[in-house]
């Protein structure tokens, strides 16, 4: 069954957009981070702190594959780093998959993340200046992987509804 995959940098709006899309197309939405948290009974923050990022990346790959191989039609919201590890980017173009990169500018991401960083171990301890520089470099490094998605939707300056409409046009 078809999998719709939404990907993009932390703060690009994956969860909110996926939830809205899910309600419209009546396909269940699963957030990969939440799925991992349920499976290992720990928060992402706790996994990073107690077992480290490499262990998290292994879990992320395992559970991404598990969702892709499930028999159900689902919308999967990836973590910001998912496409960039364990060759996960190659899974964005498989059969029965529709992948959409939600592309946001550094400014959009910064503005969204600045108020909402505590649950995100990669940026939680950075001040504003460090965070902006981190996002700029990190986004540059990650773009190679994000660009493997089959489709790209720009989210800058758009409402959730407008972005969802763009995705619906792609799916039509
Ligand atoms: C990460 C993004 C997070 C989460 C983890 C690592 C990343 O997901 O998977 O903190 O490497 O960008 P969100 O993009 O949903 O914040």
Image: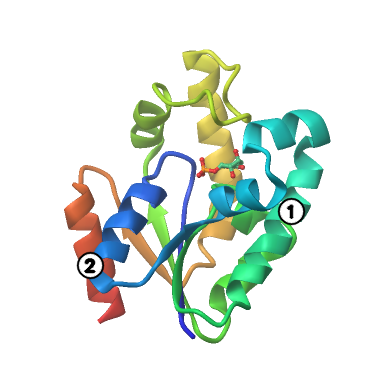
Quarter-wise, where is residue 166 in the image? bottom left
Q: Is mark 2 within 8 Å of ligand 1?
A: no
Q: Residue at x 56, y 71 (%)?
A: 92
Image quadrant in which the C terminus is located: bottom left
Instruction: Please name the colour scheme applied to the rendered image.
Output: rainbow
Q: Position of residue 43 (x, y in %)?
A: 63, 37
Q: Position of residue 55 (x, y in %)?
A: 80, 45
- Report, in whole angstroms, how far the alpha carbon at label 1 lies from the one at label 2: 30 Å
From the image, tell me which residue sits under label 1: 59
- Figure check: 89 above or below 47: below
Judge the density around disc 1: few (<14), some (14-19), many (≥20) Cα neighbours within 10 Å. Answer: some
User: Is residue 43 or residue 110 the one in the foreground?
Assistant: 43
Which quarter is ligand 1 in? top right
Secondary structure at badge 2 equals: helix
Q: Position of residue 33 (x, y in %)?
A: 57, 48
Quarter-wise, where is residue 73 in the image? bottom left
N-terminal of the pair, mark 1 or mark 2, is 2
- Figure check: 77 above or below 157: below
Q: What label sits on residue 112 in the rendered view?
A: none
Q: Is residue 25 left or right of residue 104?
A: left
User: Is residue 33 or residue 85 the one in the foreground?
Assistant: 33
- Figure check: 114 above or below 136: above
């Amino acid at each position: 069954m078809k999998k719709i995959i939404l990907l993009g940098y932390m703060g690009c709006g994956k969860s909110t957009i996926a939830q809205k899309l899910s309600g419209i197309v009546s396909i269940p939405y699963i957030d990969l981070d939440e799925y991992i948290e349920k499976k290992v009974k720990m928060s992402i923050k706790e996994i990073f702190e107690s077992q480290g990022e490499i262990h998290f990346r292994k879990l992320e790959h395992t559970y991404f594959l598990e969702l892709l191989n499930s028999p159900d039609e689902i919308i999967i919201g990836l973590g910001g780093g998912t496409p960039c590890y364990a060759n996960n980017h190659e899974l964005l173009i498989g059969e029965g998959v529709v992948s959409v990169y939600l592309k946001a500018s550094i400014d959009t991401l910064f503005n969204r993340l600045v108020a909402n960083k505590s649950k995100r171990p990669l940026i939680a301890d950075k001040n504003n200046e460090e965070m902006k520089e981190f996002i700029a470099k990190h986004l540059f490094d990650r773009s190679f992987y994000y660009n493997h998605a089959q489709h790209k939707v720009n989210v800058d300056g758009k409402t959730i509804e407008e972005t969802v409409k763009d995705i619906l046009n792609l799916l039509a």
